[in-house]
Image (cartoon, rainbow, N blue to C red):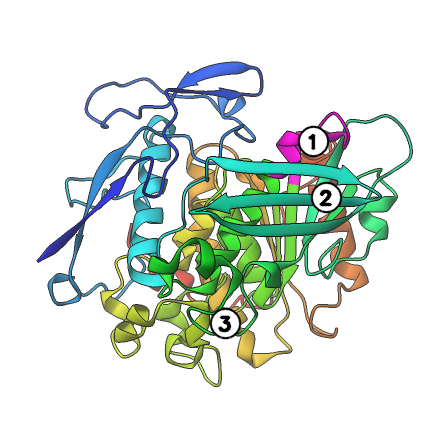
């Protein structure tokens, strides 16, 4: 038995006929790899999109657990879900990344609801208020905003839990970057009670959803609100970042994977369920494996894979890859075994190939450094974070972002990658 996951308005994807990318238009329909031999040069690849999702609707065939094949190594991010081959052409990537997204939603986190028709927003007294109405129910997001002096428009960062996430606020304040807090509990609590969360009033049929689906929806609705108040809150929506640490580092990855309006993602110490791949984590010590992670962050259905992670049709190198061609910096801390940073290293090396294949390796970096507290940015990592901010929020393309720092020279990552 197979499930057909329909990507369309009213399901997961807001359908657009065209998308505007940094001032020029590109057709939203992605062609099958056999239809054209055109290549896209690195300078033509967009840094960000102005739509939450950028492709036309299509169907993805998703097998039942029993029908899924065993894959001992990491799945190929370039391989089509129907087994018909693979494509490394950027022209096909938007379609492929949405296939990966369909798999992640179907097997792991649940469907991310589409953009509701009724959204209003206001900005007053350093507070952004976004009101979302669905089925006569209302959910309100309120965010404290730290706005620089001047007219703007300014680039902005969405900090999960506080204005700059767990990163030092001076990294953004000193660069005249707006800081916007995402109060995730207004959507779903850190340890949700299924059916009792604010989002459940809007979507009672989705009580099975994982928190990372709900929180990603909340981030997208916050961005919708920013789009509605640009006359009062001068945010440059083409230069928008998101950051968080630990469980919020996972949240940053999911939010950016499922919203293409985010130009820069800084995921700090995200561990299992974040940057780390489930397959590799299974081979390590006392780390956050699929069997050990929080059940409320994901759908219950994902835990049928707890003793069969090699049947997952995806892994988290592909969650990270979904952010391509936009910018991503992953930060790790090997002092905390639970974070499974050796698994995160293998995952980063696998995901890195996507950006390298498209000729944009400077848009992905990772730094795994010890000797500091959890969610505390050490001085050694500050230059790397600053470079990503300078390049992808401020447009300084002289900044060095080819970042690859880790203590795993003896780890054979290639045994996990056979593509």
Report how many numbered discs are placed on residues in the image. 3
- Mark 2 and mark 3: Cα distance apart in space: 25 Å
Q: Give SS at disc 1.
A: loop
User: Residue 232 colored magenta?
Assistant: yes
Extreme residue toward the right, this view: 149
Q: Which residues are magenta?
A: 225-240
Marker disc for residue 192: 3
Q: Give SS at disc 3.
A: loop
Task: Evaluate if marks 1 and 2 touch, with contact meaning CB atoms under 8 Å apart.
Answer: yes
Residue 216 seen: yes
The 10 Å Cα crowd at callout 3, few under 14, some 14 to 19, many 20 or more, is some
> Which of 96/299 is in front?
299
Q: In terms of sequence position, does the residue under pointer 2 or pointer 3 come before the other?
A: 2
- Which residue in the protein does label 1 denote? 229
> What residue is drawn where x is 53% and y is 74%?
191
> What residue is drawn where x is 29% and y is 63%?
73
Q: Is residue 162 left or right of residue 9?
A: right
Residue 396 seen: no
Task: Evaluate if marks 2 and 3 touch, with contact meaning CB atoms under 8 Å apart.
Answer: no
- Mark 1 and mark 3: Cα distance apart in space: 31 Å
Extreme residue toward the top, this view: 24
Q: In terms of sequence position, does the residue under pointer 1 or pointer 3 come before the other?
A: 3
- Which residue in the protein does label 2 denote? 128
Q: Position of residue 308 (x, y in %)?
A: 25, 74
- Mark 1 and mark 2: Cα distance apart in space: 9 Å
């Amino acid at each position: 038995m197979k499930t057909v996951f329909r990507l369309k308005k009213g399901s997961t994807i807001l359908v657009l006929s065209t998308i505007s990318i940094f001032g020029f238009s590109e057709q939203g329909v992605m062609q099958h790899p056999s239809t054209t031999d055109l290549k896209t040069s690195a300078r033509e690849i967009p840094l960000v999109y102005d739509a939450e999702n950028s492709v036309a609707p299509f169907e993805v065939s998703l097998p039942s657990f029993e029908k899924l094949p065993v894959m001992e190594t990491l799945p190929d991010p370039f391989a089509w879900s129907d087994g018909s081959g693979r494509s490394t052409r950027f022209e096909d990537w938007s379609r492929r990344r949405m296939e990966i997204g369909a798999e992640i939603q179907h097997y792991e986190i649940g469907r991310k609801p589409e953009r509701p028709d009724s959204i209003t927003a206001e900005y007053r007294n350093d507070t952004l208020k976004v009101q979302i109405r669905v089925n006569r129910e209302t959910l309100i997001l309120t965010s404290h905003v730290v706005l620089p002096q001047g007219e703007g428009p300014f680039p902005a960062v969405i900090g999960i839990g506080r204005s700059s996430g767990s990163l030092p606020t001076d990294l953004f304040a000193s660069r005249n970057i707006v800081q916007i807090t995402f109060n995730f509990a207004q959507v779903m609590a850190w340890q949700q009670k299924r059916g009792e969360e604010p989002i459940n009033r809007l979507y009672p049929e989705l009580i099975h959803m994982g928190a990372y689906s709900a929180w990603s929806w909340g981030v997208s609705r916050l961005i919708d609100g920013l789009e509605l108040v640009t006359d009062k809150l001068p945010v440059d929506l083409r230069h928008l970042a998101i950051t968080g640490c630990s469980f919020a580092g996972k949240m940053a990855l999911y939010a950016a994977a499922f919203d293409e309006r985010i130009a820069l993602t800084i995921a700090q110490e995200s561990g299992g369920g974040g940057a780390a791949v489930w397959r590799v984590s299974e081979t390590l010590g006392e780390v956050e494996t699929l069997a050990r992670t929080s059940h409320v962050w994901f759908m219950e259905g994902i835990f049928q894979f707890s003793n069969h992670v090699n049947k997952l049709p995806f892994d988290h190198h592909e969650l990270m890859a979904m952010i391509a061609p936009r910018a991503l910096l992953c930060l790790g801390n090997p002092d905390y075994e639970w974070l499974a940073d050796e698994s995160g290293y293998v995952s980063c090396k696998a995901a890195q190939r996507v950006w390298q294949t498209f000729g944009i390796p400077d848009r992905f970096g990772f730094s795994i450094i010890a000797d500091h507290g959890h969610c505390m940015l050490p001085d050694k990592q500050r230059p790397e974070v600053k470079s990503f901010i300078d390049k992808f929020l401020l447009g300084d393309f002289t900044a060095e972002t080819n970042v690859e720092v880790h203590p795993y020279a003896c780890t054979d990552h290639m045994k996990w990658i056979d593509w």
